Amino acid sequence: MTETGSRALLRRLLERTRADPAVLQRMVDAARAGSPPVAALPEQEVRRHIATLTAAVAAAFGDAGDADGVPGGLTEEQSRRAARLAADRAAQGVPLDALLDGFRAARTEAFRSIAASLTDPAPPLPEFLDLLLELDAYTGELQHRVISAYHESQANLAAGTRAARVLALRELLLGGAVDRLPAAGLEPDGRYHCTVADIGDPRRAELLPPPADGVAGLVEGHLCLVTARPPVPPATPFELAVTAPAVPAARLPGVYRLCRAALAAARARGLGGVRRLTDLAVAVATDGAPELGTLLAADLLSGLAPADPAHRVLAATALTYLDHGRRIAATAQALHVHPNTVKHRLRRLSGRTAFGTPSTADDQLTDAVRWRWALESWLRGCA
């Protein structure tokens, strides 16, 4: 295989790697595993940026190949994309070291995927190693551009009053630094709502006007608003957000952590819109102890087979039944079936489990929560 053939092979492997959703997901997982601050960002943010940077490196390598294999450098457009990544991460408050940890982890996974894609006949090793080193040079150049742009963006942010308030907000919510309340523009003796939205793109966040009664900014890559009054749609055009009742300012760090947990719980359940934290209390509590849910499922639903689609229908019907206050008509309407169908399914479930059997406990609410937790955990395990 000639050198030109080796380059052509690597270009094909690069394109295949870049276009494969499974490889992209492994790179995303590697970046998040290699850097906890990156893992705290919305996953779609990490995926968007890794896809963009992978495309930039692949294009740079391809452009060099078009120039008779003579290594060049990143184009202005490719450098601009790297700078945008750095600016976004600086605005999101991701430390530079954490950003580079995620970058390196994703790069390692990309090279691992390329190596795993090699098939017989393999290209001449010395030639292929030279090409891999050239490819790595582009990733190194990209990394240097990220570092330079990050420092530039950080300096620009530090010069702004709004950025200073957001920095104080992060120190308050993440570090519990209540002495930073005045710097964030908040009254120490005030009461505030905390709202966390599933928005991580800094440019999108900047389109929202700053609240007149509080402060808003990206915290761990999610838009966070701390306001004296609760946000009211349509002033808050969020696909998904969680808002908490007003609490004393000193309690905001703990409430923020609950909002983040509730946001993850709502996302896992396919919910949308602005959700109240208190409405998601059970979901937050059950998601916080997943192993207990598994034990409940094993204890209460041992008569169901996860591989049986009919059994999954029975469990889903019972879950909907509990969510609708054990009302047959409401359950049938939610499932778009006849009420007799709901009754039939519940009877079948009762024949395989103790569902519907009067509890020996006096607390019927506790019994309903146990069954709901078990059903949801069991269905999640079937997915």
Image: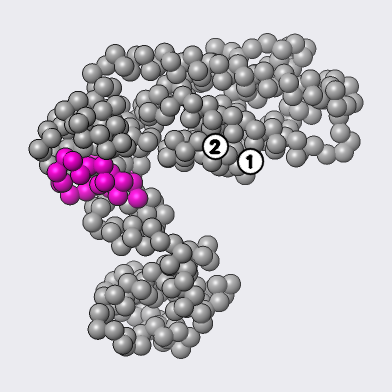
Residue occupying image coordinates x 54% and y 37%: 34
Disc 2 designates what residue? 34
Task: Identify the image quadrant of the N terminus.
Answer: top right
Residue occupying image coordinates x 28% and y 59%: 281
Residue 226 in which image quadrant: top left
Q: Which of marks 1 and 2 is in front?
A: 2
Q: Give the range drawn in magenta.
A: 233-261
Asked if marks 1 and 2 touch (Cβ < 8 Å), the reply is no
Task: Give the amino acid at mark 1.
Answer: Val
Residue occupying image coordinates x 39% and y 83%: 355
**Mark 2: which secondary structure?**
helix
Instruction: Give the camera-side residue of 294 and 60.
Output: 294
| Spatial CA span between label 1 and label 2 | 16 Å
Disc 1 designates what residue? 23
Q: Position of residue 78 (x, y in %)?
A: 56, 18
Q: How crowded is mark 1: few (under 14 residues within 10 Å), some or many (20 or more)?
A: some
In the image, 62: left or right of 247? right
Instruction: Give the camera-side residue of 249 and 342.
Output: 249
Q: Does the magenta stretch include residue 8?
A: no
Q: Position of residue 274 (x, y in %)?
A: 26, 48
Residue 240 vs 47, above or below: the answer is: below
Residue 247 vs 349, above or below: the answer is: above
Task: Give the amino acid at mark 2.
Answer: Gly
